[in-house]
């Protein structure tokens, strides 16, 4: 079909974002195309679901049901009960599960293989063992959701959606999100 | 029945979301840490593009068709402290609550531990919420929006902010073309 030679991933070694076979098989889109597509998802979110894009409250929906397996009283807590049922809560759980599926399909189409742990971690933190990285990831995930639920949203709900609605709460949360993220990254080695 | 339809819609939207996150490379921990160290700008470009797209769409949806907005309530301390914790978590996990699932989709094994930590964090917050609510998550000025604070229509402020973000993105792209930030393995590590 083409005179260009591709590597085993179907990508040109010289200019992969231009010369790869099709849009869906490209290893990378411009951040403007990818970000624009995410922004467009606000249309079905607002018109069909009557909500804004978000991700972090789905962790309360799933986490609350897991907690209820061990603690019969968990659903007596209003916060868990409020997230446990209903179309919007399960819509967001499905959205977040769909993210894993979409990313899986995209990476399969482009053939970009990933190691078990991203090489950046050894460079940035010096941690070489999987156990060390797993512990750091667990702690990171824990702080991530404590923070998101305290703030009332995450990068999606406060960031992309909240600023797009000119919400003052979101502007405060996003400013502090970058401040916290930058301060932590400055403790790492330069990557 | 309604929940079932919302779950299918959520899955479809999630697949598109995950596809865009993977193609944009913003799920890569190297891209996140690189952004927080000001070495790469992919995350900021995608984030601001998605936000600007949302601003324009919501200016039309709300301004022309009267579609309801869903801004989050302002609790200054909770937004600020939660936002800072969210940012710390983002750098430690190399992901936000949405991109965590994209990491799992592409095969990063440490992301499963971040997911476990995130669910544990959501559960811990749920148990703490009744105690936190009277301290940090009640009262406050309500669902404050920038447009009502400055006394202009939503669509006008949304379009002005969108224009400012797009101008910033154009300047950022001139300073640093997006291809320069991909790295040879598309993980945000430039060597």
Image (cartoon, rainbow, N blue to C red):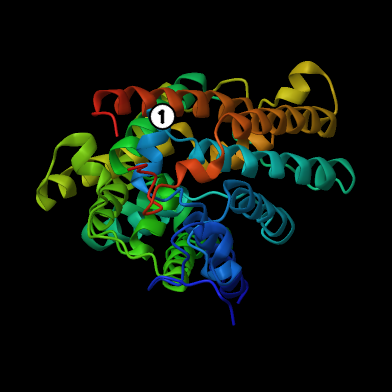
Q: Residue at x 66, y 59 (%)?
A: A49
Which element carries disc 1, helix, strand or loop?
A: helix
- Specify the quadrant that holds the N terminus of chain B: bottom right
- Asked if residue A42 lies left or right of residue A67, the reply is right
Please report the residue visible at 46 percent of the width from the left and 69 percent of the height from the top.
A110
Residue at left offset 42%, top offset 45%: A79
* x and y, in percent, of residue B141 in the image: 62, 20
- Please state if A170 lies on the left or on the right of B122 as rendered: right
Residue denoted by label 1: B82
Q: Please report the residue visible at 9 percent of the width from the left and 49 percent of the height from the top.
A: A129
> Residue B29, how many percent across, how many down?
34, 45
Instruction: Determine the residue located farthest toward the bottom in the rendered image.
Output: A1
Q: Is residue A92 visible?
A: no
Looking at the image, residue A21 lies above or below residue B51: below
Give the percent coordinates (x, y) of residue A100.
Answer: 42, 64
- Kindly indicate the quadrant of the structure image that contains residue B60: top right
| Snapshot quadrant of residue A158 | top right
Marker count (numbered): 1
Image quadrant in which you'd find residue A8 = bottom left
Residue sitting nearer the eye, A107 or B9: A107
Query: Is residue A75 rendered to the left or right of residue B3?
Result: left
């Amino acid at each position: 079909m083409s005179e260009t030679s591709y590597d085993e991933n179907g990508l040109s070694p010289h200019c992969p974002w231009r010369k790869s076979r099709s849009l869906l098989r490209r290893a990378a889109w411009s951040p403007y195309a990818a970000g624009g597509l995410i922004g467009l998802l606000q249309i079905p979110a607002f018109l069909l679901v009557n909500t804004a894009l978000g991700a972090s409250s789905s962790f309360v929906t799933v986490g609350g049901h897991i907690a209820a397996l061990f603690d019969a009283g968990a659903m007596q807590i209003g916060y868990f009960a409020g997230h446990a049922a209903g179309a919007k809560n399960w819509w967001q759980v499905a959205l977040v599960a769909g993210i894993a599926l979409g990313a899986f399909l995209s990476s399969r189409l482009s053939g970009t293989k990933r190691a078990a742990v991203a090489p950046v971690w050894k460079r940035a933190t010096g941690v070489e063992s999987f156990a060390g990285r797993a512990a750091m990831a667990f702690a990171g995930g824990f702080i991530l959701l404590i923070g998101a639920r305290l703030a009332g949203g995450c990068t999606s709900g406060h960031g992309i959606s909240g600023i797009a609605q000119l919400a003052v709460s979101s502007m405060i949360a996003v400013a502090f999100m970058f401040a916290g993220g930058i301060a932590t990254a400055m403790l790492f080695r330069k990557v | 029945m309604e929940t079932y339809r919302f779950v299918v819609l959520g899955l479809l939207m999630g697949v598109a979301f995950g596809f865009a996150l993977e193609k944009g490379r913003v799920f890569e921990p190297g891209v996140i840490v690189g952004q927080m160290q000001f070495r790469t700008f992919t995350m900021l470009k995608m984030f601001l593009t998605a936000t600007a797209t949302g601003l324009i769409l919501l200016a039309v949806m709300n301004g022309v068709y009267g579609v309801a907005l869903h801004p989050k309530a302002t609790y200054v301390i909770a937004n600020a402290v939660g936002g800072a914790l969210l940012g710390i978590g983002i750098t430690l996990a190399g992901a936000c609550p949405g991109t965590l699932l994209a990491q799992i989709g592409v095969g990063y094994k440490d992301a499963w531990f971040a997911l476990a930590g995130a669910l544990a964090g959501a559960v811990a917050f749920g148990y703490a919420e009744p105690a936190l609510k009277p301290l940090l998550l009640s009262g406050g000025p309500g669902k404050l929006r920038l447009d009502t604070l400055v006394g202009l229509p939503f669509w006008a402020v949304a379009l002005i902010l969108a224009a400012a973000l797009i101008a910033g993105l154009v300047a950022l792209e001139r300073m640093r073309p997006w291809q320069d930030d991909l790295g040879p393995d598309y993980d945000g590590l430039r060597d």
